[in-house]
Amino acid sequence: GNSVTQMEGPVTLSEEAFLTINCTYTATGYPSLFWYVQYPGEGLQLLLKATKADDKGSNKGFEATYRKETTSFHLEKGSVQVSDSAVYFCALSDYSNYQLIWGAGTKLIIKP
Amino acid sequence: DADVTQTPRNRITKTGKRIMLECSQTKGHDRMYWYRQDPGLGLRLIYYSFDVKDINKGEISDGYSVSRQAQAKFSLSLESAIPNQTALYFCATSDPDKYGEQYFGPGTRLTVT
């Protein structure tokens, strides 16, 4: 079945460091891929998405490229800020039942 | 005002009690979802509704029931709460053509003692 695997957290970085959060997936067909972010005490919100192979999603300085050959959708940011501290979720669309399949989430802690 | 609201935001209850969590949305979306979040487990889908007359079980529906009172309202009930239902509960909505783009409420933190 379809699944999403994210790197375990927490990931702790200093401000202005380069960020990578790994996400790999298993899926039949050609799913769309998503990154959601959950700030402390809030609900999740869509950060970026990609709908086909080689697409790059981007938002708020974050980027992720849909790599079909490696079944990956890693989240990157060149210079993180304290305000980026949050939990990040990778997800894919399951066309068999029109649902999202979620990764376990990766907590990111940015220290000033 | 928030597009997706949930009430209550926090609730402590005792084992065996009936609890209802409510969700309202002003997005005008037909699709609504209830998720449960536990540390390290991501989000798990409890129930989802494609419209007022179409309600479906998700991955972990046992012990839960739902009611879709209107397009804008979707309630989750725990008929007889148990401690392992202690979790953070989220309501979400989406457009039918963009079901991957979901809009979440702020969550309800439920503790069952």
Image (tube, rainbow, N blue to C red):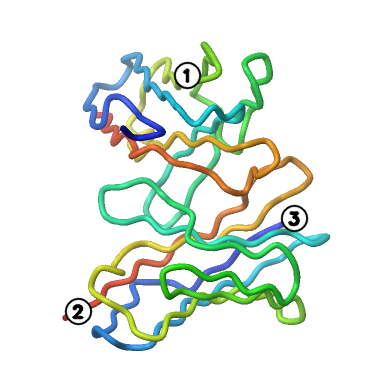
Provide residue A19's location: percent of width, then percent of height: 40, 82
Instruction: Check residue B73 in the rendering and tell me which mark sits there, or answer none.
Output: 1
Provide residue A51's location: percent of width, then percent of height: 70, 62
The answer to whether residue B102 is above or below residue A18 is above
Q: Measuring 24% from the left and 23% from the top, which residue is drawn there?
A: B13
Instruction: Check residue A95 in the rendering and tell me which mark sits there, or answer none.
Output: none
The answer to whether residue A74 is above or below residue A45 is below
Horizontally, residue A96 falls left or right of residue B60, namely: right
C-alpha span from label 1 to label 3: 32 Å
Provide residue A53's location: percent of width, then percent of height: 75, 72
Which numbered disc, 3 or 2, marks the residue that appears first in the sequence?
A: 3
- What kind of residue is marked 3? Gly
Provide residue B99's location: percent of width, then percent of height: 64, 43
Where does label 3 land, which residue? A1
Quarter occupied by the C terminus of chain B = top left
Label 3 secondary element: loop
Q: Measuring 34% from the left and 17% from the top, which residue is drawn there?
A: B19
Q: Nearer the viewer, mark 3 or mark 2?
A: 2
Q: Nearer the viewer, mark 1 or mark 2?
A: 1
- What kind of residue is marked 1? Lys
Q: Are marks 3 and 2 in contact (CB under 8 Å)?
A: no
Horizontally, residue A14 falls left or right of residue A8, namely: left
Chain letter, disc 1 residue: B
C-alpha span from label 1 to label 2: 40 Å
Quadrant of residue B24 within the rendered picture: top left
Q: Nearer the viewer, mark 1 or mark 3?
A: 1
Query: Closer to the camera, A79 or B89?
Result: A79
